[in-house]
Image: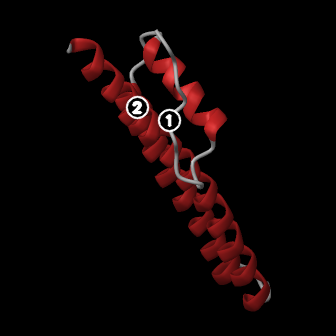
Amino acid sequence: MSHTTPRRPWYVPDALADDYCEIALSGGDLRMLKTLKIFRSILVNAGIIGITLTALFLTAADATIITVLSLSTLALYNGVEVADYAALAAAFAEVRAQQTEEEK
């Protein structure tokens, strides 16, 4: 049985997708992992927005600096989350394709 590495899009980190494939093949639940990642992302985004609004309305901080820093933080965090989610989705598709191939 030969094991070939599938071609993945450039934005999917190969090592991370391989780790997710290993988790799925060892009995892990990728759907639960996906749900937890989405929940974590919502909480972190709400936290960043909450801290930003608190800094803007309750302190005498400069609005320009706070806004730029918070938008930069949100963009950076969500970029990392999108790459992580893309790796999870790619692993999910690969494991499903492998299971379908084995059933044939």
Nearest to the eye among marks 1 and 2: give it.
1
Residue type, label 1: Pro
Q: Image height check: is 20 above or below 35?
A: above
Mark 1 lies on residue: 6
Q: Residue shown at 42%/42% (left/top)?
A: 89
Circle nearer the N terminus (1, 2): 1
Q: Residues within 10 Å of mark 2 (few under 14, many from 20)?
A: some
Q: Image height check: is 52 above or below 83?
A: below
Whether residue 36 is visible to the viewer of this picture, yes or no, is: no
* Mark 1 in CB contact with mark 2 (< 8 angstroms): yes
Q: Image height check: is 70 above or below 23?
A: below
Q: Residues within 10 Å of mark 1 (few under 14, many from 20)?
A: few
Q: Position of residue 71 (x, y in %)?
A: 65, 76
Q: In front here: 2 or 22?
A: 2
Res 94 label:
2
Q: In front here: 94 or 39?
A: 94
Mark 1–mark 2 Cα distance, whole angstroms, equals: 8 Å
Q: How is the image coloured?
A: secondary structure
